[in-house]
Amino acid sequence: VEGELGRIGGTEDQVSVSAREATMTDPEEARLFAEETGVDALAVAIGTAHGRYQGAPELDFERLEAIARAVPVPLVLHGSSGVPDDHIRRAVKLGVRKINIDTDIRIAFVEAVRHFLQEVPEEIDPRKVLGPAREAITGVIRHKIRVFRGQ
């Protein structure tokens, strides 16, 4: 079971949380939550946001390090699409074990379909339209796996 403490900025499932409303996860609250609930993993708010970023994300690595020291379960980062690779590598070194990147995958998919249909607008075979999208998301996922492994 994955629990979540704090509020991630951005929009997910048509629910918007502004940057002002987003609150960071408190390390002591995270420790108590993990101990009292017995969650298997804990998603933490350290500056990521759902959806596309308006600017460069600023992750609070000191907060992440404090949470990792306080919490005995694997940590999760929601809203990690668009986060620079070096930030992801650092987060993994500090204890993050699950990283959500759905928006990166969606963007690759949609951009590949749009590009294909611009090049071949008369195509109506979904297998041909979706082939480039599959290749695009495969490329994104392979890259992310390497990043998650610290490469």
Image: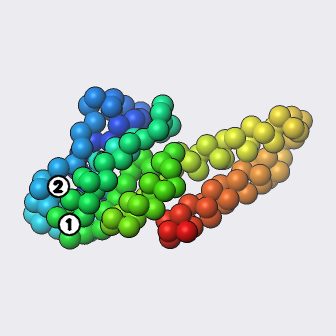
Kindly indicate whether the residue at mark 1 contacts the one at mark 2 (C-beta within 8 angstroms).
yes
Question: Is residue 134 in sight in this rendering?
Answer: no
Which image quadrant: the C terminus? bottom right
Measuring 31% from the left and 48% from the top, which residue is drawn there?
60
87, 2: nearer the viewer: 87
Does the rendering let one see residue 105? Answer: yes
Residue 24 found in image quarter: top left
In the visual, does 49 lie left or right of 135?
left
Judge whether 128 appears above or below 15 on screen: below
Question: Picture coordinates of residue 111 (x, y %)?
Answer: 69, 41
**Residue denoted by label 2:** 27
Pointer 2 or 1: first along the chain: 2
Q: Amino acid under label 2?
A: Pro
Question: Residue at 67% across / 59% down in the picture?
Answer: 139
With 69 as the anchor, is 91 left or right in this view? Answer: right
The quadrant holding residue 72 is bottom left
Image location of residue 100, percent across then percent down = 45, 54
**Residue assigned mark 1:** 69
> Residue 8: horizontal and vertical position, in percent?
33, 42
Q: Nearer the viewer, residue 13 or 6?
A: 6
